[in-house]
């Protein structure tokens, strides 16, 4: 199983995402923004960071890069695509996911271990969780406020397309506490928090059991492998 | 060469944290008459040849599709900048 991770100018978490893919049991494949070649990967991760310095709008210029034409075509074929943080912003800008991300309502960058509830455990990236599972993974962003018009919000809620919801506090003013969403087919998922930073004991969020022992993010990557194996 | 100006603002119904921060700073300067600030973007596109109606139409299309995101922003103006004499 080969999972591609696209590196854009200004990507920061591409190597962490590659590491997460490896820990989950798949082979990470480095993909480059300037190419039209997906190297035959089975799934794609758009990693976090500040592509193009967030110029124009977060994720906007990256969403127009050569590789994104191929990512969009692959997503429309049903290939699993995960957008993390800046990657979620790219998916929104590319219209693969509805809504948009705006500056945090409190105006400051936020970095914390964030509790989430898995609302939809039937997507390509969440099938390993139980519906309603509570997980903790890091969140770090300045523009993570999810917004959409009332009609889109009603559709997301009505069709069960909210994948993750913030628990405890709403860290950025996201409408309906939405942390992540999926497309109707369930192969494209975007979220602001970072599963790739919670995949290995010693490097994850603190848990009641031990410091930095949280690995709740790994299931997102093993879910994609399971989804691909079942095809 | 002519310049075409595109102005984009965050949607009125959405929170504008940048504008709110500027309004807060104005208050701290004692300029509390100015009760709200909204902060947007202005693009200046230098164009080869004439800024004719076809060019303006092309820029209007780009303004909607690329220079702004209609989920979070509105294009409020597309116009040709007058040449300074």
Image (cartoon, coloured by chain):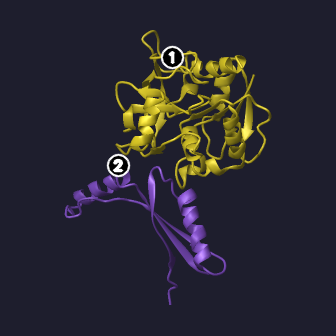
Q: What subunit carries mark 1? A: A
Residue A31 in picture, x, y percent from top left? 73, 38
Q: Is residue A69 left or right of residue B57?
A: right
Q: Which of marks 2 and 1 is in front?
A: 2
Q: In which quarter of the image is residue A114?
A: top left
Percent from the top left, x then y, of residue A115? 42, 23
Vertical arrangement, residue B6 with respect to residue A2, above or below:
below
Rendered location of residue A59, percent (x, y) = 57, 46
Position of A208 relative to A151 (above/below): above
Please state which of residues A22 and A93 is positioned toward the viewer in this rendering: A93
Image quadrant assignment for residue A223: top right
Going by the image, does B25 lie left or right of A73?
left
Does the rendering let one see residue A25?
Answer: yes
User: Is residue A171 among what the camera can see?
Assistant: no
- B84 lies left or right of A108: right
* Rendered image: mark on residue A214: 1
Circle 1 crowding by C-alpha within 10 Å: few under 14, some 14–19, many from 20: many
Q: Which quadrant, please, contains the C terminus of chain A?
A: top right
Element at label 1? loop
The answer to whether marks 2 and 1 mark residues whose Cβ atoms lie closer than 8 Å is no
> Furthest residue to the bottom?
B85
| Numbered circles on residues, count | 2
Mark 2 crowd level (few <14, some 14–19, many ≥20, 10 Å Cα): many
The Cα–Cα distance between marks 2 and 1, rounded to whole angstroms, is: 34 Å
Q: Which residue is drawn at 66% across and 17% down?
A: A226
Q: What is the letter of the purple chain?
A: B
Relative depth, front residue between A139 and A62: A62
Element on which disc 2 rests: loop
Residue B15 - label: 2
Q: The yellow chain is which one?
A: A
Task: For the N terminus of chain A, give its image quadrant.
Answer: top right
């Amino acid at each position: 199983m080969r999972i591609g991770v696209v590196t854009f100018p200004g990507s920061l978490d591409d190597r962490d995402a590659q590491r997460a893919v490896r820990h989950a049991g798949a082979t990470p494949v480095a993909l480059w923004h300037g190419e039209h070649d997906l190297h035959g990967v089975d799934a794609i991760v758009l990693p976090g960071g500040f592509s193009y310095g967030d110029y124009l709008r977060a994720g906007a210029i990256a969403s127009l890069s050569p590789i994104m034409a191929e990512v969009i075509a692959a997503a429309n074929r049903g290939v699993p695509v995960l957008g993390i943080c800046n990657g979620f912003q790219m998916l929104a800008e590319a219209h693969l996911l509805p809504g948009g991300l705006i500056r945090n309502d409190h105006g400051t960058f936020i970095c914390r271990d964030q509790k989430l509830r898995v609302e939809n455990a039937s997507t390509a990236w969440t099938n390993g969780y139980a519906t309603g599972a509570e997980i903790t993974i890091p969140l770090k962003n300045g523009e993570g406020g999810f917004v959409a018009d009332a009609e889109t919000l009603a559709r997301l809620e009505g069709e069960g397309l909210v994948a993750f919801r913030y628990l405890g506090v709403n860290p950025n003013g996201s409408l309906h506490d939405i942390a992540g969403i999926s497309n109707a087919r369930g192969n494209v998922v975007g979220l602001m928090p970072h599963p790739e930073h919670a995949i290995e004991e010693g490097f994850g969020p603190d848990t009641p059991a031990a410091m930095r022992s949280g690995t709740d993010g790994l299931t997102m990557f093993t879910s994609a492998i399971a989804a691909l194996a079942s095809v | 060469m002519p310049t075409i100006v595109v102005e984009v603002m965050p949607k009125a119904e959405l929170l504008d944290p940048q504008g709110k921060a500027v309004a807060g700073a104005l208050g701290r300067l004692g300029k509390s008459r100015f009760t709200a600030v909204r902060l947007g973007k202005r693009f200046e596109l230098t164009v080869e040849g004439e800024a004719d109606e076809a060019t303006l139409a092309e820029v209007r299309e780009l303004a909607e599709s690329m220079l702004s995101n209609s989920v979070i922003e509105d294009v409020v103006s597309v116009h040709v900048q007058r040449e300074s004499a």
